[in-house]
Image (cartoon, coloured by chain):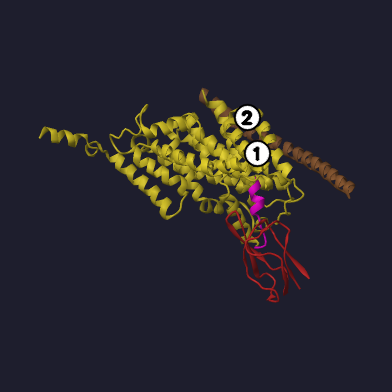
Chain colours: A yellow, B red, C brown
Amino acid sequence: MELFQEVILRTGFLALTWGQLVMWAVGFTLIYLAIRKGFEPLLLLPIGFGILLANIPLTPLMTPGSGLIWRFYHYGLEWEVIPPLIFLGLGAMTDFGPMIANPKTLLLGAAAQVGVYFTFFLALLLKFTVPQAAVIGIIGGADGPTTIYLASKLAPEMMGVCAVAAYSYMAMVPLIQPPVMKLLTTEAERKIVMKSLRPVSKLEKIFFPVVALFVICLIVPDAAPLMAMFMMGNLFRESGVVARLSNAAQNELMNIVTIFLGVSVGATMPAATVLQPKVIFVFILGCAAFMLATATGVLFAKFMNLFLKEKINPLIGAAGVSAVPMAARVVAKLGSEANRKNYLLMHAMGPNVAGVIGTAVAAGMFISVLAK
Amino acid sequence: MVNLESPLSGKILEINMEVGQQVNEDDEVIIIEALKMENPVYCPATGVVKEIKVRIGDQVNEGDILAVIE
Amino acid sequence: MESSALILKCFVAGVTGVFLVMAILQVAVTLSSKLAIWIESKTVDKNAASQAGKG
């Protein structure tokens, strides 16, 4: 009889808490959204599963020093290996052509980051610590790996929640951005047709990652881990001589690290860390961050128009948030709604890829000021 | 004679016209896919399709001539 | 009060950093494009010349 009792005590059932049950519901919701609604399934599915894993009592999965998922987390995220590897793949996927053809769009990629700082202040008003506020602000950059990277450096306890906020809002970019964009532009501005982009030669595209590497890393050394990998991936792509490496970075390596990223990020969310009233604010602030970044991008595009002879369509400023290519698609859609012969997709890709660089630079600046 | 030029680079997904067919200005004659987004291309003039220079699946660049309308 | 100094530093450093990087990158990209196009025009000339020579 005593033996029987002991067996029961060793099962997880008695150790289960209400919080863990709530987290199961959260995990199942993310898995449901991923499978049924197609919300960023490549990330939300493993993250959702990771949340389940972190909330099954008495399992040795997240035991520091020995747990299986803990090892993924420790060597992948704490050692800052995975986000830069994702950037390697992103670099190999990114065509900087539209940006090289119209370098002015780089400034739009910077402007959208101003929204990051507005959100940073809002988060401070809500009594988050400075490093936490920085991570919440960077959600506005709409860049998952950068958010995770910054969290691992500054506020690991925020990583899971901020990653979920970033990825779920990224899936909702077509809902979040258009109202802000319409509010800040007039019909006439949305109708502006932009001059077609000049063709960009192969050599220009090869020069770009090398030039960008030096410029970025010399000015913001702390952005180097992400940017070094990003530019190397892009050089793989544009050089044309290492198609195998470029493909591996974009496909196999990217897929492999995405698995470990998702499950480890999910596993950083045991009930005790997540179920706090403050978490609600993270989601509200995350949404505000996306809207503010969209707004500052659009407003800066209008500001640039004051000085430009060839006007740009201010909608493309909204693509300065780095959700590639969702934000560019939203811009193209709104542009064609105003004027159906307006094709803004490629024009929006310039600020869009510039936004990726901008967010990484903003993260680098936070690290240089705040990291011990 | 009016050339129908590609407004952006991408892949030809659909062609909704045939040589010899009567088309009207602003008809949606071709759909180009770029970044997994369908972009309709509108006919620049009313007339008869004289020549279609692309086929479904072709990769086109911005400014390429897709068709000639007479 | 130390924290408000830190916050200000974050903001000022961040915004100037981001815009500085982008502004300099814009100049650098424009220059590197010019260089690339110049180099390519040179090599194209050479190719054309050598082919003309062969002919």
User: Does C22 appear above or below A66?
Assistant: below
Q: Quadrant of the N terminus of chain A?
A: top left
The region drawn magenta spans: A340-350
Residue wearing tag 1: A235
User: Does A65 appear above or below B66?
Assistant: above
* Residue A89 sits in quarter: top right
Looking at the picture, tell me which residue is in the foreground, A70 or B43.
A70
Q: Residues within 10 Å of mark 1 (few under 14, many from 20)?
A: many
* Helix, strand or loop at mark 2: loop
In the image, taking residue B28 as reference, residue A59 lies left or right, namely left
Residue A29 point in image, percent of width and height: 37, 49
Residue A353 point in image, percent of width and height: 62, 44
In the image, taking residue A222 as reference, residue A27 lies left or right, namely left
In the image, taking residue B59 as reference, residue C53 lies left or right, namely right
In the image, which disc is placed on residue A220?
Answer: 2
Residue A341 point in image, percent of width and height: 67, 62
Counting residues from the start of the chain, the first of labels 2 and 1 encountered is 2
The amino acid on which the numbered mark 2 sits, given as a three-letter code, is Val
* Helix, strand or loop at mark 1: helix
Query: Depth-wise, is mark 2 or mark 1 nearer the camera?
Result: 1
User: Does B33 appear above or below A199?
Assistant: below
Regarding residue C1, the answer to whether it shows in the image is no
